[in-house]
Amino acid sequence: MGIFQRRPSGPEFAPQPTRPRVPPNQSVTTSFPTLTVEQIPSVDMNNFTFRFWGEVREPTGMTWQQLMAVKHTTMTADFHCVTGFSMLGTEWGGALVRDVLEAAHVQLSTSARFVMAHCITEFTTNLPLDALLADDTMLVWEWNRLPLTNEHGGPLRLLVPSLYAWKDAKWVSGFEFLAEDRPGYWESRGYHMHGDPWKEERYG
């Protein structure tokens, strides 16, 4: 015999409106513009190490070969640039960040609340820890089933579909876990510390 449960009622249980797929003041495009403030680097994959440090039990790292051995994930996601363009339904290949952390045996300290993504270049960007560990946050090396090109952040790029794409650090090379939030490259130059496209968190 099943158990009947009455559906909760009241304003706090009212259905929540579905947010639009395209954030405010964004224009949809099918192209993938190349936007970078830095010189496009050349990466030696034989000497590449992805590092984890800061608020962790023990700093560690992964070689490119170890990273490629992490469970592969393919995901279709939308991409929203703070400059005003959105690409819908693009396919990315790589590994979920949480799978990478598990494979690297990274143990976060209880004080870890934020993360700074560091790159082979001098670029950095900050994220709340829950955004880094979200179900759709990835380290990607494929775009539309092809290797991610250098101009778009290859060989390795961070993908955080819930935030503006400046948070998707190109040529990413490590995560520094933080107890307190700290601005990265664009955030220290006036961009928003969080960057939610649906709230238009473009500038601080």
Image (cartoon, rainbow, N blue to C red):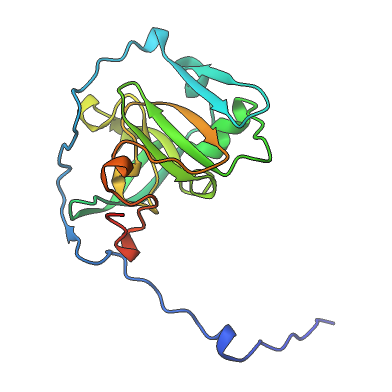
* Image point (31%, 65%), residue name: 21
Determine which quarter of the picture holds residue 143: top left
* Image point (39%, 52%), residue name: 194
Q: Is residue 58 left or right of residue 96?
A: right
Q: Is residue 15 above or below residue 74?
A: below
- Closer-to-camera residue (91/140): 140
Residue 89: horizontal and vertical position, in percent?
29, 53
Q: Is residue 59 left or right of residue 96?
A: right
Q: How many marks?
A: 0
- Closer-to-camera residue (119/42): 119
**Furthest residue in direction bottom, as rendered:** 10
Q: Is residue 9 left or right of residue 140?
A: right
- Closer-to-camera residue (168/127): 127
* Image point (51%, 49%), residue name: 134
**Furthest residue in direction right, as rendered:** 1
Residue 125: horizontal and vertical position, in percent?
37, 38
**Furthest residue in direction top, as rendered:** 46
* Image point (18%, 32%), residue name: 37
Q: Is residue 88 left or right of residue 176?
A: left
Q: Quadrant of the C terminus?
A: bottom left
Q: Quadrant of the N terminus?
A: bottom right
Determine which quarter of the picture holds residue 99: top right
Residue 76: horizontal and vertical position, in percent?
37, 49
Determine which quarter of the picture holds residue 45: top left
Residue 146: horizontal and vertical position, in percent?
28, 31
